[in-house]
Amino acid sequence: MELPVREIKKYQTAAGIEPFNEWLHELDWTTQAKIDAYVIRAARGATKNVKPVGQGVFEIVIDYGPGYRVYFGQFGGQIIVLLLGGTKRRQNQDIQQAIEYWRDYRAKNG
């Protein structure tokens, strides 16, 4: 039985940039497809590869390549907001940036 997918949105900066999309589009098609599959699983509520990293931000650990990560927040229980993507190597910096993006998103959207 498939679970319904929560709505997925992407964070946008004041300049209109979507950091998640900018990162994702730098990757090859195979990697993009694998990351998309992990995001959809998380949107369906699968938590095997998801962990909280602080201040309402969660990390999806992707078991592929150099240890890809996707950072997101949940809004209203029905929406997943994709904030940023990265790799294990930049994990600490990416978490801090994702937290800043999440604060900005919540300030703008309640």
Image: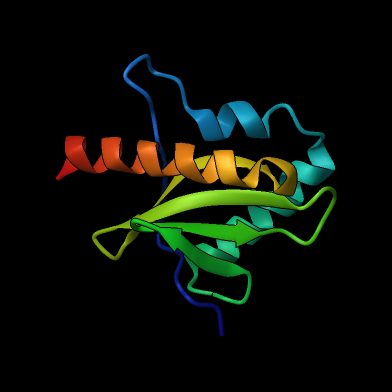
Asked whether 25 or 86 is in front, the reply is: 86
Quarter of the image where the C terminus is located: top left
Most foreground residue, 41 or 107: 107
Residue at 57% of width from left, 31% of height from top?
Answer: 21
Q: Residue 43, how many percent across, how many down? A: 48, 63
Residue 20, position in %: x, y?
54, 35
Image quadrant for the N terminus? Answer: bottom right
Report which quarter residue 7 is drawn in. bottom left
Image position of 76 with respect to 23: above or below: below
Q: Residue at x 78, y 62 (%)?
A: 63
Q: Quadrant of residue 85?
A: top right
Q: Residue at x 39, y 18 (%)?
A: 16
Q: Is residue 24 above or below residue 39?
A: above
Q: Residue pushed farthest bottom?
A: 1
**Residue 109 drawn above or below residue 78:** above
- Which residue is rendered at x = 54% and y = 58% of the image? 59
